[in-house]
Image (spheres, rainbow, N blue to C red):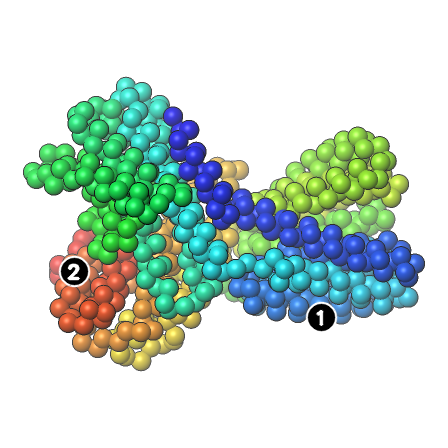
Amino acid sequence: MRGRAWVGELRTWATGVDPGWGRLRFAGVATAAMALAVLLMSGVRALSGQPITVVLFAAVLAMVSNLSVTEPELGRRRVTTALMVLPAAASTVVGTLLVEHRTVSDVVFVLVMMVAVVVRRFGARGTALGMALFMPYFFTQFLQARPEQLPWLLAAVGVGIGSTLLLRGFVFADDPEKILDRLTVALRAHVHALALAVVDVLEAPAQDRAKIDDALRDVARRRTRLNDTMLQVADQFDRLDRPADESRELQLADLELAAERLAVSTRRLADDPARPGALEPEVRRALIAGARGIAAGTATGIPDDSRAIALAGARRSVDPLAAEHGGARPREQRLAFAVVRLADALEGGGDHPPPAPVEVDQDAEPEEETTDGPKGLALSTRQAVQVGVATSLAIVAGELVSPARWYWAVIAAFVVFAGTASRGDVLTRGWQRLVGTVGGVVAGMGLALLVGGHVVVSLVLLACCVFLALYLVRISTGLLAFWITAVLALLYGVIGQFSVETLVLRVVETAVGGALGALAGFLVLPKHTREAFREALDETVDALDDTLAATTDRLLGRPAAGVPVELARVADEKLKVLRERARPLDSPLPRRRGRGSYQRALRVLTAVDHYARSFARLSDGLVAPEWTALDPAVAAVRANLAALGEVLAEQTPEVRSAEQLVDEAEAAAATTEDPARRTAMLTAARLVRRIDQVVVRLVDDLAGVPAGTSGQRG
């Protein structure tokens, strides 16, 4: 049934913007940077007679600089990568000079790790510079570097980081314009796949509920991937940061909303077990023809005139149903409206708001207990103390297990705190790393025994394992540990030190380090997972509220508390933190009540963030002091946004839809004589309406309280 929908899925790969393709590109560039660093330092080694350690040092720094620098903007990415040379060089010097003073070097090692965590408070750049401080120091201890090697190790720092800067920052740097063009093609390809999935739902026999449910799950998957692509579109517009692109972004956002409406209307139509197969034959044929017309109009590579013909055909198929009066077939009519709405949006003509609120589905129970406590120490300070305790214990425990391999316990204890914010985060990362290491030991032993000392084959497999580790690092830390452990097994085979005992020891040391990290996370200044999520939720809601307030003030000619576009960027950063905090709450082990409500809130806030950024950009070129009707509408929307945080904290807020107030603001905007000014004001009203629609719907679902109308006083 779903074969046609997978055609659209394959087309998104062809655009080069599917997340899998992005990971493939990242892994390829990172592996190339490591290969370049190895090649250059091998030449240096051949001339200088230095040991192989300088080559490994350069390769490690090339990998670390690729993994650590995560800023989306090319300019900032270049600067951050270049800045990594400074802490890396300083750490290399200190680590090399202290390597023979074991006690002092261990104390400094713990301090270095604590500093590497503290600087995370400065965002993505701080995190990258912290890793540049930690990894070189660690490897000077691991490789037992000698002072006479220091000049060559510093050269390896420059070569390793420089290779990343050259390839990732210049040779294979992303072209923002080309990426945006590919994203636009990908968005249409996802609409194509969604339309084909809708056809599958409509064609499923009424008596075969399993097929209907399977097709509906496919619709939900296509919808999720469409949303993910639209988030990439929004991020890309932020990187371009050109006001001239506002209309294009709004058109694409309109397309996403129209496609969402098609998915939601299809699900509603299929809710009745007697549907969709029991539809009247002519109605069913009309809806199928409409969905097929949408699919034909979004096929990749279709000429513009053929696209227009296909979309016109889609409208004609459902126009009679959409024009019916009397409400005898409301669900069918909603789907017909959705087809017309999507056809309009695909031609850039969807300027009016949808006739019904955007809906967020996914069934889930409201979240349970947990009282918020005082925020106390900053997260980075709290984690620095936890890391200090965990790694100090790991040094002692690692020495007791094996004086020669103690460093595996230390790095395991340190890594479990990377990108974590709560006890659940630490526990999840710890067990993933342990499971990945165990699997990697088995795979590594198999590979090492298979190649049997063949150096060329081993090197090829080494490159493949490194590539897979880099490709999968953004999916799971466990998969990263799996392939890195396999790399170590092959590396030991190449240098003639392979043994089963060594790999088993790695598992033991990793388990010890991970356990001590988890223990510190649970006992030293612990942060509950739900508490961490709710703190991030409060910060995100507050940041979005600040954006809406400042934008409204600026639009109405009043002094604003900040620059709206900058406040919108802050909100976006807060949302990214919230997304990270939500991951442990979505873990299937153990099964958690309320998982769905967290994820639904996250999806809604993602949509609000997108609309708030577009709303903020409008304030750069529009001031309308006479538009007083906007003020109460935004105030009502802000109140509903605050209610979202309250309902997740198990309070019962009063929720009143702002539809009537937005209608009044829209009517006032429509009287403006200047066409350009009127369009901008109507666009602002539409964005406010959409924020209210998604928020009110979710609050209503979670709280179980029917939303009233804010325009109705008393």
Closer to us: 536 or 57? 57
Give coordinates of residue 29: x percent, y percent: 64, 52
Q: Along the polypeptide, which appears first: circle 1 or circle 2?
A: 1
- Crowding at dot 1, Cα within 10 Å, few <14 / some 14-19 / many 20+, comes out as some
- 638 vs 550, nearest the viewer: 550
Q: Residue at x 79, y 54 (%)?
A: 39
| 631 versus 400 height, above or below | below
Taking the view exactly as shown, the residue that stands out farthest to the right is 49
Q: Residue 156: x, y in percent?
A: 79, 62
Secondary structure type for disc 1: helix
| Residue 475 placement, left or right of 443 | left
Q: Amino acid at mark 1?
A: Leu
The residue labelled by disc 1 is: 86
Residue 491 in the image, given as x and y percentages of width and height:
81, 43
Circle 2: residue type: Asp
- Measured in 3D between alpha carbons, the distance from the residue under mark 1 to the one under mark 2, in whole angstroms, is 57 Å
Q: Which residue: 18% across, 24% down?
A: 281
Label 2 sits on a secondary structure element that is helix
Instruction: Identify the image quadrant of residue 171.
Output: bottom right
